[in-house]
Image (cartoon, rainbow, N blue to C red):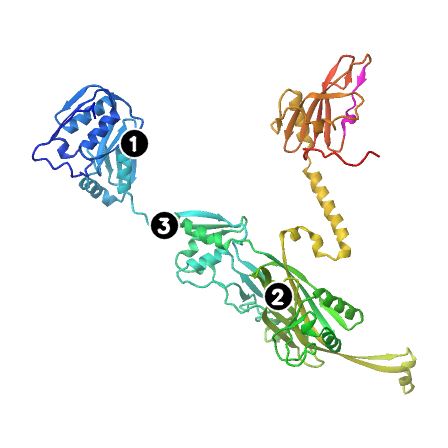
Amino acid sequence: MSNRISLLIILLNVLPMTCIDAFAAVPNHWNEASYAYDGNNAPVKVVLTDFADSFNVRLDMSSSLKGIVEAKIRSESATTFIERLALEYQFQWFVYGGVLHISPLRDQQVVRIEVSEDAVGDLKQALTEIGLLDPRFGWGELLDEGVVLVSGPKKYVQLVRKLSKKKLKPDDKSEIMVFPLNYASVSDRTINYRDSEVVIPGVATVLSGLLSKRGREVPSGSSASKGSSKSTGLSPQVVVGAGAPSYPPPLPISNLGGRTSDKIGADVRNNILLIRDNIEKRSMYEGLIKRLDVPRKLVEISAIILDIDRVKLAELGAQWQLTTHGVTGGVNTKGTNPFLSPGTAATIFINDPGHFLADLRALEGDGEASIVANPTVLTLENQPAVVDLSETVYLTATGERVVNIQSVTAGISLQVVPRTIQQDNKEQIQLVVDIEDGQLVRPAGSDLSVRKSTISTQAVVSTGRALILGGFHVKKSNKSSNKVPLLGDIPIIGNAFSYQESSASSRERLFILSPRIIDIEQQADPTAYVEKQNRSRVRQAVKSVEDRQLRAARPNLIDIEGALKDMVNGQIPLSLTAAGTPPSNILARLCVNAEQPVDFSYGQWFRGDNFNVAVGQVVNKGHQTIRFDESGCGTKNVLAVSAWPKTVLRPGDDAEVFVVMLPDKGPVRATLRSAP
């Protein structure tokens, strides 16, 4: 540089300049080498940059440090040179790791660093040996507390703190992390299924199982009996027709082993997952929870439990020719069902449920079929839907000074777990079905017995189709005696006036399942769930509810009154914003029926979230006193009208007219019809 004259004299016993010192204390060779610099109006940053280059160190200088070096400076050593500049330009400096750090004097810090009690002395020695500790800066020790006090430039203090950082125990690093869940449930879901419970684990249980040291697998669903016979005198309850999968009971969060039980908590009120762990693991938890907390589709399952005459069922199957007219064969036990030909199965698919149900209704009208139940349930995919139609009988067994009560439950139970499958741009529904048909039987003079039949299967059904399961054989016999009153009771000849009637029926019990995926639009339309003849009444009820909600959403009278008071006093309400003059489409509808014209051409227009206000002026230009009638400004969108300061106007008097109306929905469209 033309304005720079640098003279560097290094004695023979000084280390070569290519060696980078790592001492925060002044390097030794800086005290043994003289240094001269001709400023010649050079900025202080340029001077310090040249100085750093001369000693092969990098400059780290605060941008707020300014100044001009005008004189020629000669010093006996480099340390004396930079100390002279520091005194004149009010900065502090230190060297560490090949970097010359320069900062203003105001950039001074005092910090308290906590270390273990027995490490205070060792820490000072270690910092000295690595060349960071500088005697020019402050250092204090509180041995009893295991604390050191350090003062100096901000960068110097940061380096000391970084190297003195106390190693934290795992518990010391723990922080509580909060993860709100939008779709998944944070807590377990328990389904009371007769005398047992089916538990669907929530996100908290799933994560606890994954993070436990035992590595136990968390089941997708589990069942556990609620009965107990400890000291109550009650024997364990007998469950007939429960139909629940035999999963092992879930492992409680408090017994998961390790320290996992202390890490995960669930805020059921807000569906929030709480995790106490090392904050560095937050990204891992976020990624895992993001995959678990995903929206799931809603599946509607309509079930028909049907008893149908075996002969009519066979005719119905023959009429449809099974595989060629909308019914497709499946796989099940061998042909006990006359609905199917020999060698086929008792599980079939219906491609045209509407036609099939119409035939069933016709058979029901003829007394050849009866619908036992027709429930419809709505559930999320991969979540069980349970329908239980059961009867419970309590039996008592009396012993010496003890009475045991035993419950026996039987009936129809249906548990379905749907799952959607996307294949070839078509949605199908996989159904995991558990059906149990139980019946309490007590013949005359015999003990109570239970007869049950079960089906456990899986099937894939296309949307809009139905699945038939069953084929259970149901026999009913009935004997009755009919006679003519009085005459039928006469001995011997009474038989002529009475007769015995017996009937027997053989029927098949079928379970018809019709799943369908419910989208957002259908969820919002309740008419999709009722018969066509009832949809008009449902629509009227929905409209009535919407009207009530709209009236509830209208602005409060107190809010309007408060806004008008503020405007009368010359203030703009906080809920309104000035928007110039009223728009032309609004002007065309304001006070059109008023006897006295209201001028809004130079009026004011205020907009709000709940209502708008138009301000106009009415003037009595006549020779008689008139009264302004606010009702002339009333339309269906007008909420309130007020005239200020008075409504009785003498000749020449005027008043402001405030018209409060609902927020406009946009420009008005002109009609194309001719006027009537």
Name which residue lies at 24% across and 40% down: 143
Cα–Cα gap, marks 1 and 3: 30 Å
Cα–Cα gap, marks 1 and 2: 73 Å
- Left or right of residue 543: residue 160: left
Identify the image quadrant of the N terminus: top left
For label 1, count other residues whose C-alpha is less than 10 Å away and answer few (under 14), some (14-19) or many (20+).
Answer: some
For label 3, count other residues whose C-alpha is less than 10 Å away and answer few (under 14), some (14-19) or many (20+).
Answer: few
First-in-chain label (1 vs 2): 1
First-in-chain label (1 vs 3): 1
Residue 631 included in the magenta stretch of the image: yes
Q: Image quadrant of residue 673? A: top right
Q: Nearer the viewer, residue 519 or 412?
A: 519
Asked if 127 appears above or below 492 in the picture, the reply is above
- Left or right of residue 15: residue 599: right
> Label 3 belongs to which residue?
171
Q: Nearer the viewer, mark 1 or mark 3?
A: 1
Q: Which residues are magenta?
A: 625-634
Cα–Cα gap, marks 3 and 2: 52 Å
- Left or right of residue 277: residue 377: right
Q: Nearer the viewer, residue 171 or 71?
A: 71
Q: Which mark is residue 109?
A: 1
For label 2, count other residues whose C-alpha is less than 10 Å away and answer few (under 14), some (14-19) or many (20+).
Answer: many
> Label 2 belongs to which residue?
461
